[in-house]
Amino acid sequence: MSDAAAPHPGPVRDWDLAQLRALAAAADLGTLDAAARALHVTPSAVSQRIKALEHATGAVLLRRERPVRPTAAGEALVLLARQIDALTSDASRGLGAAGLPTVRIAVNGDSLATWVLPALAALAATASVRISREDQDRSAELLRDGEVMAAITSQARSVQGCTVEPLGVMRYRPMASPGFRDRWFSSGGPRADALSAAPVVVFDADDRLQDRYLTTHGVDPHDPPRHLVPASAEFVTAVRLGYGWGMLPDLQVTDDVAAGRVVPIDEGPTQGRPTSRCSGSSGRCAPRPSTPQLRRCAPGLAARSSPGVTGPAVTCHRAPACYVRPMPRSHAAVPGRSR
């Protein structure tokens, strides 16, 4: 569409800084991919922000050519974006500090309750960490939408503009209190008729761990009664108190198992899924995160995300993977029910 065909921009009272910076980055670097790398977001997020800005102004702001170029209306907003950034930098210098960079990460609840915070401790001294709790089967969506720069996920396929790197395995076993097990599964383990009637604890509507276990035993997941407990520590407490059985991560119940407060309901063979970390850039990568802050904490992420498991168990392996947004001239990596 030519400049002449573009509608006249309408008044905008409140400018969205993320949208302005997306437009300026695209104009400066010539492609949406390059802008995404500079802003640590996905190309899709850059495109969506520019389209939203065009909708808000009622004007075509970018010529979709190679390289992309701003229209006359777009040039005015690119200048505005640069002026805002300059004023922001001046204000920071006037305050005597540039402030800490913000690192936004999507993490599932069970990882957050166990290994993630210790693994990211080194990051907290050099960056403002903002964690979004999201199920690991959906956390990559936050990365895809540009809301976070890294995600722990069970998805092995990388988000566009990012890479995925294996982190290890989170092992889950079907557990219950001793009294609950003796009441429902006292004779020969969890038979299908017992599983169809025994209450089960689930985290939220996205928690499929218990459903998968039931399905493998020929039970319709909708048959047994359900207790909904949408918090990681309280989920374990509900199982310990005998509300029902549930899939518990070994990392979280080591002491409970040792003390006999929770016991496995099944001693069958292990089944599992791989774990990975995704980082922003194309292709597979070693633990080489994109920012200095992320780079320093990468070894801890990998070390803490691969716990061992002892004893026989029917185990569901959650797959933490880390997706990180693209960074200029380097790679990024940080690990992602809402558990």
Image (tube, grey):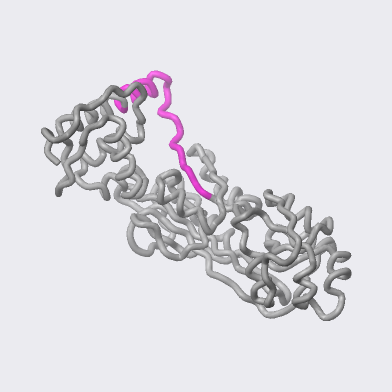
Q: Position of residue 240 (x, y in %)?
A: 81, 58
The residue nearer to you, when weighing 283 against 31, is: 31
Occupied quadrant, residue 19 = top left
Q: Residue at x 48, y 38 (%)?
A: 127
Quick check: can you spot residue 98? yes
Asked whether residue 101 is drawn in magenta, I would say yes
Q: Quadrant of the C terminus?
A: bottom right
Q: Residue at x 35, y 46 (%)?
A: 45
Q: On the picture, is 13 further left or further right than 302?
A: left
Occupied quadrant, residue 14 = top left
The residue nearer to you, when weighing 198 against 159, is: 198
Quick check: can you spot residue 115? no
Residue at the top extreme of this rendering: 94
Q: Position of residue 186 (x, y in %)?
A: 87, 75
Q: Residue at x 14, y 49 (%)?
A: 66
Q: Position of residue 281 (x, y in %)?
A: 34, 55
Q: Magenta stretch: give its range.
A: 85-106
Asked whether residue 133 is drawn in magenta, I would say no
Q: Residue at x 56, y 70 (%)?
A: 273
